[in-house]
Amino acid sequence: MKNPVRYFSAIVTLCASTSAAAQLLQNTAGGALETVDQTLQRTLPQPLPEIERQVLKKPLAASRERLSRLPQTLPILNVHGDTAFVEVTTDTGFRAVAREWLIAIDSGDREKLRHKAVDIIEEKDYPALALKTLRIRVPATWDNADTLRRRLDLDENAMIDRNHIYSPQAQADAAVTPEIEILASAVCDSPLRLGMIDTAINDQHPALKDRPIISRSFLNSDLHPASAHGTAVAGLLVGADPGLSPLIPNATLYAAAIFYGRDAYSQGATLDAMLAALQWLAEQQVPVINMSLAGPPNALLKRAISALSEQQIQIVAAVGNEGPAAPPLYPAAYDEVVAVTAVDGANKIYRWANRGEHVDFAARGVALKTARGKQDVGLESGTSMAAALVSARLTCERSRSGSMAETLGILIRNAKDLGEPGHDPVFGHGLLERH
């Protein structure tokens, strides 16, 4: 190291700068983490040699990784400071609401369950999803699929699953080198309709406050809403700002908010909120629904997506940011869903992108300029960002073609083959660009 005294001084300066540290943590909310390079540039008193910058990056990157980990059991507090529910890591390694399950029911099931040691929280009817559900709370000793089926005396074909929790799929990456964004033309200028399920959108953001966005929240009003991730996705789709290139600037965006804030750094969305959002979007007759989120497989979610597919409503989902060795995430891994991975400006795969035979398309998703939660504009990365472009392409093509199958065929033929010839588990059918 060229100057160890200067290096030590730089660390002291960075660590002592509590306001800078607070700002860094604040920027992590909703996946809007400021790049480490930007933090260093803004907080250190003078430029450092590159080797010293790289050394300083490591603890900050490690800090980001620690923030992404969740404890085995996590109470979710409401706006009054009380525990609304408890998140747990299940025996399959995914997150769910502790002791909460959803059952697809017929008319006789409710009465049958009244005589069991379960609490019926609510009953919901989702006609567009071909589902009627009971959300129940079970004794702690029953909080297991096999035990629960046996205790409830359910038929082996009965559809029951946990109230699983899903996460948004965008993040800043310390390894991302900011690229010069060249303003590009829209995918199309038609007055279309597109649905999205995400966090809330900051409708006071200068790039979004006058845009045709119809929002509805499916979050319990007592929970803390999250907004950064949905703001970023909406900014890519319809954001109006001198520095942005909206994909479908004249579209009406139907935005369903389902994510609560766990803390300042991460968000979650329950399955029951997601089902309600899907029902509402189906009622709005949107042809495409963007779901830049991922999580575990779930029997009721699969049923809902199949029902929407039969109505020619296409789900587009991010494949996830868990890395190339991670298992498939859902809903992207369902057959009826268009699964999207991310590449950078050089068409190299995003290093955190999930892989698998379910991947359908790749799109630019690294260092994209978009609206951010704190009413500024910045760079975002992740498979979430890539999914927005594919949703826009599908929506535009669908308005010109006869069916969703025909639309998908057009996109497959127009995709630029990357990697191995033909469909592959990294890039799917290939890269979709704006045109």
Image (cartoon, rainbow, N blue to C red):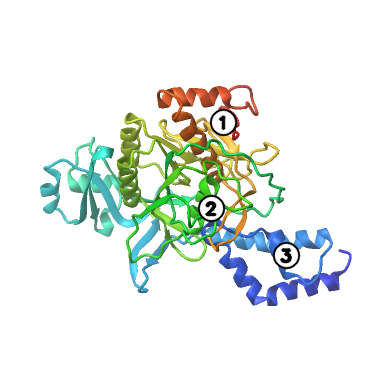
Dot 2 amino acid type? Ala
The relative height of residue 59 versus residue 100 in the rendered view (above or below) is below
- The percent coordinates of residue 185 (x first, y second) are 61, 39
- The percent coordinates of residue 431 (x first, y second) are 60, 31
Distance Cα–Cα, label 2 vs label 3: 23 Å
Under tag 2, what secondary structure?
helix
Along the polypeptide, which appears first: circle 3 or circle 1? 3
- The residue at 63%/22% (across/down) is 421
Under tag 1, what secondary structure?
loop
Which residue is labeled 1 in the image? 425
Residue 232: which numbered mark, if any? 2
Residue 327 is left or right of residue 151, and the answer is right
> Residue 90: in sight, yes or no?
no
- The percent coordinates of residue 223 (x first, y second) are 36, 65
Residue 40: which numbered mark, if any? 3
- The percent coordinates of residue 25 (x first, y second) are 58, 67
Farthest right residue in view:
2
Q: Quadrant of residue 347?
A: top right
Between residue 119 and residue 199, name the one nearer to us. 199
